[in-house]
Image (spheres, helix red, strand yellow):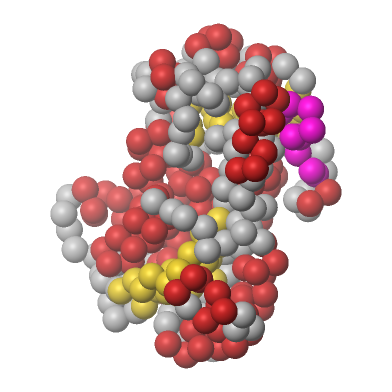
Amino acid sequence: MTTPLRHYLQFKDFSTEEYAYLFRRAHWIKDRFKRYETYHPLFDRTLVMIFEKASTRTRLSFEAGMQQLGGSAIYLNTRDSQLGRGEPIYDTAQVLSGMCDLVMIRTFEQATVEQLAAASRVPVINGLTNDYHPCQVLADIFTFIEHRGPIAGKTVVWVGDANNMCNTWLQAAEVLDFCVHISSPPGYGVQLEKIGLSGTDHFQLFDDPKDACRGAHLVTTDVWTSMGFEAENEARRQAFAGWCVDSNLMTVAASDAVFMHCLPAHRGEEVTPEVIDGPQSLVWEEAENRLHAQKALMEFLALGRIDEQTGAARCEANCC
């Protein structure tokens, strides 16, 4: 029986129950990895990785992850491919669909990802766009669950630019039933109309980042100037001067609060060294978990749900 093709373009593409499954699979896959046990469910499968934006963690985690699952990963940069010379996305999608099993793309415009997925006959994964970064938040929440248990009912604070990470946290809050406190400088706040939220019950906006952090369970931030906005760097330095995550902010959070950052980080700008390198920081665990969370994601998209008792694939995604 043929089942609908699944893509992962925004966090809200999956249900609460599907995320619970993915987090269990990520835990199981990570445990096998840590015990040096071979697990090759994607033997002879191929992942194509398309990069328009530079990357360290995205390329490493997807490439290593696919190889650890028994498959192969191929790197394409738009500068070195026909996409960079104006080949229509539809044509590229048709070629990729005939030669590979999964596509991951890291690019600027969300429309590029959406158009690629619309024309693709294999699963497409959003490795990052200007609007969303679902794979990073998937790993972040998996990390929180590992260290603090379920995230439902908890408070996550976003300090700084309301960028693609902030947008994705807002979607995640609706799907997984937690609250996001957002504090951004004037002119850099969240554009709620772009995110497609169903209501306003899962977030609050704050002028003062310290007020946003009171009682929070997770405090997270990102660089002040994201890729593609380098021309605004000096203006952003001035605007964001009061939005640095320091010990004063972490002190008013919950006693067991943790700090996360998707990296790369600029110490002394969006976060101080004593926070990112301190005992509340989970940034290195968070970075590693990109690998394990994405392995669970690729397994699900390629094979469907794995029966957690027998280990057999249940064809409900793209395996039929």
Residue 116 to residue 308: above or below: below
**Residue shown at 58%/70% (left/top)?**
7
Residue 48, how many percent across, how many down? 42, 74
Q: Magenta includes 187?
A: yes
Which of these two is toward me, 291 or 200? 291
- How many circles with numbers are drawn on the protein? 0
Q: Main secondary structure of the magenta part?
A: loop
Q: Quadrant of residue 243?
A: top right
Quarter of the rendering occupied by the N terminus: bottom right
Q: Is residue 285 left or right of residue 103?
A: left
Q: Is residue 180 left or right of residue 45?
A: right
Which of these two is toward me, 182 or 292? 182
Residue 307, how many percent across, how many down? 40, 67
Residue 283 to residue 214: above or below: below
Residue 300 to residue 139: above or below: below
**Residue shown at 64%/83% (left/top)?**
88
Residue 182, how many percent across, how many down? 70, 29
Q: Does the image show residue 70?
A: yes
**Residue shown at 36%/78% (left/top)?**
46
Residue 114, how many percent across, how many down? 67, 70
**The residue stretch that appears in magenta:** 181-192
**Residue shown at 43%/80% (left/top)?**
101
